[in-house]
Image: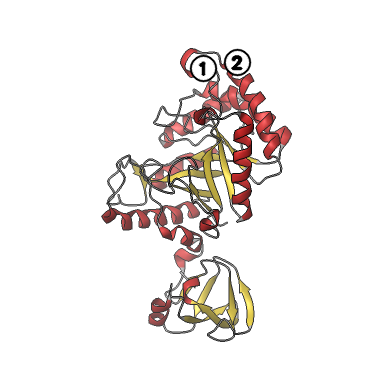
Amino acid sequence: MKTAVGVNVNPFAVNGAPLSKSDLRGKVDFVRFVYQIDSQRLSVPQAISYYQDQVDKYNAVGIVPIIIINQETGWFNGPWLHGGWNDYISSMKSRLKEIIAAHQHQLIVWQIWNEGDILGVSSIYLSPTIYYKLVSEIVPVIRSLCNHKILSGGMASSASSVFAYVKSMEQLNGNRKLTFFDALSLHPYGQYVKTKPNISTGWFGDFTNYMATVKTLGYPMWLTEVGVAEDSGFPDSQKPAIEQYMKDMYSASQLHGVEAFIWWSYSSALRGGYMPNSIGDLKALSSPTPNRQPNQANLKDTANLRSERSTLGKILAVVKRGTLVTCLDCVTSLQCKLGNKEEWVWVDVNGSKGYLRGDMLV
């Protein structure tokens, strides 16, 4: 299984999302953002019109939005301040009927809340009891109107706390697995692969140990925020380390069977995040890449295998993104040609020999 790739965006922030959705074509499978209505002082019809257009544009370039439903979608009576959850849930159900009906024929993944297991910068804490009550009432509304996937709210606490939170909800569900969600969403900030990177952010533990705990819950897993985030941002000198961290975490996620890896974030407009240009190369790191030989490479995007070193050459085969190919030139030649659109590499693709352009290989 290849782990899907995505990035968090904010279309309302300056430089928080690409001006042209095609800038992300072929680089990511998903984008993730909040369905902001009350936080942007929009009417429901205004918001629906805006987001229908956003989703259409992403879908047109092969990208599926993961859209978060939370307090920014509907503040209503703010029960986290004064109580009154029954009224809040009733109001949210009514609003969601309008929203889901308007988007039911678009390609979307819905996510219910964001980091509700902690009280953070952009999250409102919900106890397991309250979150169970919320999802048990609003998820059926969504399911009745569309067949879109639904994710739990991204959980950002420690692995042991995530485990306890989910187990508490299962107890409320009669000690049965939760069927509200198609996957458990996690935000493993501060987790690293083997050694702490030289990046000025908080580090809490080893990602392998984190995954060992959450995997025992037995749910499909999506990482809907993974990366580094600091209000102060990061100096240019640390950006190569961030790029390597992204690649290491993606490779590790692949090995742990994570279904989707959504990077934080598109730009520093989203709490100091940073997106390396190489995000588009992540899929080429999918298995069996960790074990590939020095004379092998992966396709970074679908490409034509040609009979000669030219786009005028006969197309021998269409090679899909992520395919492992063997270079028939020497290893030194391959390393010099990788990423170079002016060079052609002689390769073997499952027994078919021909030429691929260097910039299509990673």
Residue linked to disc 2: 87
Is 345 or 251 nearer to us in this picture?
345
Indicate the position of residue 257 as horizontal and vertical percent values: 53, 51
Label 2: element kind: helix
Looking at the image, is mark 2 or mark 1 earlier in the sequence?
A: 1
Q: Is residue 301 above or below residue 7?
A: below
Instruction: Report the residue at 64% width, 81% height from top.
Output: 316
Q: Are marks 2 and 1 in contact (CB under 8 Å)?
A: yes
| SS at circle 1 | helix
* Amino acid type, callout 1: Pro
The quadrant holding residue 123 is top left
Q: Which residue is mark 1?
A: 79
Q: Is there any visible trace of residue 219 in the rendered image?
A: no
Amino acid found under the numbered disc labelled 2: Asp
In this rendering, would 125 be left or right of 133? left
Mark 1 Cα shell of 10 Å, populated few (<14), some (14-19), many (≥20) = some
Q: Residues within 10 Å of mark 2 (few under 14, many from 20)?
A: some
Quadrant the N terminus occupies: bottom right
User: How far apart in space, not on screen, are marks 2 and 1 (Cα)?
Assistant: 8 Å
Q: Where residue 264 is drawn, which disc sits there?
A: none
Residue at horizontal 59 percent and vertical 68 percent from the top: 320
- Please state the horizontal and vertical placement of residue 149, each as a whole percent of the image: 64, 41
Q: Is residue 162 visible?
A: yes
